[in-house]
Image: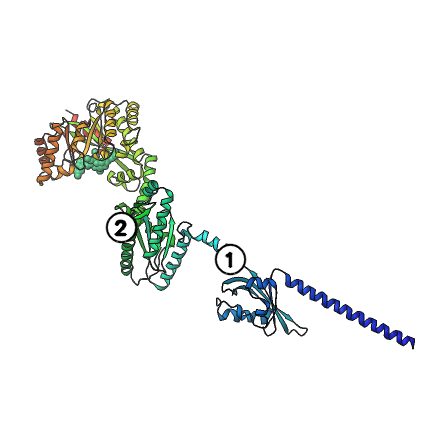
Amino acid sequence: MWGWWKNKEQRQAQELQRLQAQLHAAQAEQRLADVVFQIPVAVLVTSARGVIERINAAFTQLTGYAPDEVVGKTPWLLRSGHHDEAFYVAMRASIQQTGRWQGEIWDRHKDGSIIPKWMTITAVADAQGQPTHFVATYVDISERKRAEEERHRLAFYDALTRLPNRTLALERLQLAISASARSSVHGAVLLIDLDDFRRINDSAGHAQGDVLLQQVAERLLACVDAEDTVARMGGDEFLLVLAEACTSAEKAAAHIEQLAARVLHALGQDYLLGGDRFRCGASIGAALFAKGAPPAQDVVKQAELAMYQAKQEGGGKLHFFDAALEQAVARRVQLERELDEALAQGHLALHYQPQVAPGGQVVGAEALVRWRHPERGLVSPGEFIPLAEDTGQILPLGAWVLQTACDQLAAWAGQPHTANLTLAVNVSALQFGQSDFVAQVAQAIERSGARPQLLKLELTESMLVDDVDGVIAKMHALRALGLRLSLDDFGTGYSSLAYLRRMPIDQLKIDQSFVRDLLQDANAMAIARSVAALGHSLGLDVVAEGVETAAQRDALADLGCASYQGYFFGRPVALPEFEAWLARLAAP
Ligand code: C2E
Ligand code: MG
Ligand code: MG
């Protein structure tokens, strides 16, 4: 009996213990759930049917909704409209198949603002695998998004003007090029470079220069359609990528012309900078692209070439890229490289053209440079001197000519029939403008041992464009070395008679264009006559160049020319030929 009681008591105690343990466990679970719900991650729990049962404080903080505002409703109320139906279909499918979904979702805050979140949904299943609940956790990623956007902005946008930068511009252009290739339409880019930015930047200060660039950006944006890209390529260079696709190159060109006119007009208006008004023109280079177009960078280069052409023509205008221009540029680049080689490898030579006195005796020669090109043969200076002047290669080239001519004079000194010949050397404005030019000439004379009296430097009127006093002082210094000065191509430039009178020159060379037309054109004759008269009145020798006929020589003799040069007497020839010719003349 007692045993039974005892057993019953024991059983009850055991049951109690078990219940207490269960209670304990449940309490622990509840505490655990409560603790879990206090974590700083937003949590939302729905029933299997998607009705919200519970949210935590972090969720309220993130979305603005208190529990009583959402419990009993569905998460639908968070929808922002940012995602389409397919997005939610895919989400449901993933949960059904894997019990999970994870991704970026843009929900609406209670205040209406949109918050990007990273959401994880996990299904909670019962013993049979049926979902009883869904638990969603959210992480606010708006900070990260902002940082990402900022990084994107810095990488792809210009900080000053907020326009797309070069990287983004090239990216968009590449897209446009690809699109035009697919649909066989014509697209276009315009490269815009300000003509006077440096001047304004220097005079008004960099801060105002920045303001100018911002105003330019605004004006450009106002000129184009919303779909067009306006980008800042750097400095004062902007790029327009046109969205409008044209069915033909002609239509595209017409569209560009209209747009360029608008842009030039807009940019040509006064800029108000720090209370002062400024004007700043622009040059535009345009390039079209269609199927088969080169990559974006090359299309921009084409526009750049066209823009440089517009600048060269004085700025303030539009120029189109064309293939011929590109070829010309490529040829120039090649020529420049080859000329470097020619200078280094001694592929230059001097040819000598006689200068003859009225009595027929040879009084001297002009040294004319030639390029002995390994493939193209003899190249005349008209093809490479202008280039050499642009690139500065004229400086080493000119120095070589000068030294070679002086050496030649020294060599001629040893032969009676050449000992008294003068030698004229052409000097470029750039060469003459060097501050140590006089010293270079003195050194060439000294090194060679030539008699300076026999050296003649042919200068041109183009040297007189600025700093006339400096030029004249330099001429005096050269004359002091004992050499003589001649003014080449006289009559084609713009020398003022007042300056001419002050210049210590010995000779005027009537330009060959007047000599050529002397007998057919009364104007040419009148100019030749005036040059001769001017020379005489200033006490200068007058030389005529380009004399090709006896009739020209006779007419020039009547004008009182002191000497002649031209094919009639002899063409420029290499040294051995020239010397052989002289020897034949000297032979009794
Ligand atoms: P330039 O100094 O006025 O030289 C005269 C040019 O007329 C030479 O051309 C000569 O060959 C050409 N010529 C001479 N007689 C006649 C003629 O009867 N009829 C015609 N139609 N032409 C004639 P080239 O040698 O081609 O030189 C052209 C220009 O290149 C020169 O004009 C000169 O400005 C420049 N140049 C030549 N050599 C040098 C040089 O060593 N240094 C520099 N800086 N320039 C040079
Ligand atoms: Mg000359
Ligand atoms: Mg000449």
**Mark 1 residue crowding within 10 angstroms, few (<14) / some (14–19) / many (20+):** some
Q: CA distance from mark 1 to mark 2?
A: 44 Å
Q: Secondary structure at mark 2?
A: loop
**Where in the figure is residue 512, as x and y percent of width and height?**
16, 37
Q: Is residue 326 above or below residue 481?
A: below
**Where in the figure is residue 426, as x and y percent of width and height?**
23, 32
Q: Amino acid at mark 1?
A: Lys
**Where in the figure is residue 207, as x and y percent of width and height?**
38, 44
Q: Is residue 372 above or below residue 503?
A: below
Asked if one can make out residue 224 in the rendered structure from this viewpoint, the answer is yes
Q: Amino acid at mark 2?
A: Lys
Q: Is residue 10 above or below residue 450?
A: below
* Rendered image quadrant of residue 137: bottom right
* Label 1 vs 2, first from the N-terminus: 1
Which mark, by number, is residue 114? Answer: none
Residue lying furthest bottom: 1
Ligand 2 appears in which quadrant?
A: top left
Image quadrant in which the C terminus is located:
top left
Asked if one can make out residue 571 in the rendered structure from this viewpoint, the answer is no
**Mark 1, residue position:** 145
Position of 468 with respect to 180 (left or right) is left
**Mark 2 residue crowding within 10 angstroms, few (<14) / some (14–19) / many (20+):** some
Decide if ligand 1 comes within 8 Å of the CB at mark 1. Answer: no
Tell me, yes or no, whether the two marked residues, 1 and 2, touch with CB atoms within 8 Å.
Answer: no
**Where in the figure is residue 422, as x and y percent of width and height?**
20, 26
Image quadrant in which the N terminus is located:
bottom right
Position of 84 with respect to 134 (left or right) is left
Position of 66 with respect to 173 (left or right) is right
Residue lying furthest right: 1
Q: Secondary structure at mark 1?
A: helix
**Mark 2, residue position:** 317
Q: Foreground residue, 165 or 54?
A: 54
